[in-house]
Amino acid sequence: DTGVSQNPRHKITKRGQNVTFRCDPISEHNRLYWYRQTLGQGPEFLTYFQNEAQLEKSRLLSDRFSAERPKGSFSTLEIQRTEQGDSAMYLCASRSYSGRIYEQYFGPGTRLTVT
Amino acid sequence: AQRVTQPEKLLSVFKGAPVELKCNYSYSGSPELFWYVQYSRQRLQLLLRHISRESIKGFTADLNKGETSFHLKKPFAQEEDSAMYYCALSYSGAGSYQLTFGKGTKLSVIP
């Protein structure tokens, strides 16, 4: 499968615990995005990387959230001291920087449930 | 700030009937608009982009800058069109081209 992959697919954690998600983009894509989707809403932008540089962060990304993309390949999203409001689907997407090709390819998502 | 509005949460149509999924946007710049679709148990995938002016699976969408709309249309609905549809706007804030999505419309095609 050459698409975007995300692990784990599901995560249940207790409030106050830390969690980390991983995203593996399509190999030749240098841009990587994280989105969050809650019930009844469309995906909302969290942050974006071009290669290893994190270039933009949404106001939705509180201090408890941190994202990395070492070596410009896979990315991790960590949430510290999880809260029930963090329960959501976390989506990763990637795209190439190639002229006017704007399509972002999405992964299957990681569903987080905070109890 | 950019915003995408999809006024219908749920749209039910009979097989063979025309479909129109509404999308309105607000954005001060020149927008790039998309329709994404999510079939049951599948990931979000691109259906249409306005710059391509193409028809995919019988769907078309025209950007109307005067009405700030990008409605998705299909003349004859098929059962396999049942899915969640999201309208999205590409925003080049800081060069990111992040997507701003509407809340989505669930299309249900009744056999």
Image (cartoon, grey):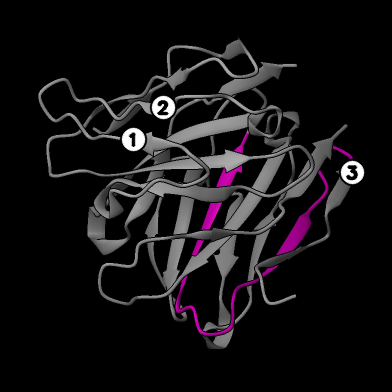
Q: To which chain does the residue with label 1 belong?
A: B
Checking the image for residue A12, the label placed there is 3
Tell me which segment is drawn in magenta: A13-37
Q: Is residue A21 above or below residue A112?
A: below
- Magenta run includes residue B67: no
Q: Secondary structure at mark 2?
A: strand
Amino acid type of the residue tagged 1 in the rendering = Ala
Q: Residue at x 70, y 42 (%)?
A: A89
Question: Does mark 3 fall on the same chain as mark 1?
Answer: no
Q: Residue at x 71, y 52 (%)?
A: A109
Residue that carries the numbered disc 2 in the rendered image: B73
Near mark 1 (Cα within 10 A), the count class, few <14, some 14-19 or many ≥20, is many
Q: To which chain does the residue with label 2 belong?
A: B
Q: Secondary structure at mark 1?
A: strand
Q: CA distance from mark 3 to mark 2?
A: 39 Å
Amino acid type of the residue tagged 3 in the rendering = Ile
Question: Does mark 2 fall on the same chain as mark 3?
Answer: no
| A31 sits to left or right of A18 | left
- Magenta run includes residue A18: yes
| A59 sits to left or right of B94 | right
Checking the image for residue B61, the label placed there is 1
Give x and y (percent) for residue A52. Answer: 47, 80
Q: To which chain does the residue with label 3 belong?
A: A
Q: Nearer the viewer, residue B76 or B9?
A: B76
Q: Secondary structure at mark 3?
A: strand
Q: Nearer the viewer, residue B21 or B59?
A: B59
Among numbered discs 2 and 1, the one appearing first in the sequence: 1
